[in-house]
């Protein structure tokens, strides 16, 4: 079981990842993300970012990992629907 402090740290880390994902679009690549904007959207001071990630590259790797996990989950759900005769 995580302590309150660890839970808050994980919540903030999650907020940073979600903020970064929300700023990506067809017109805006990861390379153009601003650490300051990501931190502001997550509701933390830019300097606090470094309590959760070593640098922006580590944030990017976390985003890639999470994207892969989401894709695997979607594929698993699709296979289950197909196995049950759905589409």
Image: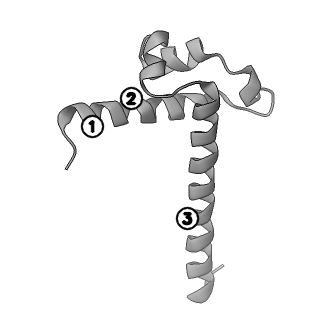
Element at label 3: helix
Tag shown at residue 42: none
Q: Which residue is mark 2?
A: 12
Sequence-earlier tag: 3 or 2: 2
Q: In the current view of this chain or complex, which residue is farthest to the front? A: 54
Which residue is at a point 63% across and 55% down the rendered structure image? Answer: 68
Is 4 left, or right, of 68 in this rendering? left
The residue sitting at 61% across, 79% down in the picture is 79
The answer for how far apart the CA atoms under marks 3 and 2 are is: 24 Å
Crowd tier of the residue under label 3, counting other residues whose Cα lies within 10 Å: few below 14, some 14–19, many 20 or above: few
Label 2 SS: helix
Q: Is residue 19 above or below residue 72?
A: above
**For discs 3 and 2, the disc positioned in front in the rendered view:** 2
Decide which of tag 2 and tag 1 comes sooner along the chain. Answer: 1
Against 29, is 78 above or below?
below
Residue at which label 3 appears: 73
Q: Which residue is mark 1?
A: 7
Neighbours of disc 2 within 10 Å: few (<14), some (14-19), many (20+)? many
């Amino acid at each position: 079981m995580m302590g309150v402090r660890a839970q808050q740290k994980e919540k903030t880390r999650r907020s940073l990842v979600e903020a970064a994902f929300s700023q990506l679009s067809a017109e805006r690549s990861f390379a153009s993300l601003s650490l300051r904007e990501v931190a502001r959207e997550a509701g933390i001071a830019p300097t606090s970012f470094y309590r959760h990630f070593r640098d922006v590259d580590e944030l990017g790797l976390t985003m890639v990992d999470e994207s892969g996990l989401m894709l695997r989950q979607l594929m698993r759900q699709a296979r289950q629907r197909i196995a049950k005769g759905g589409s």
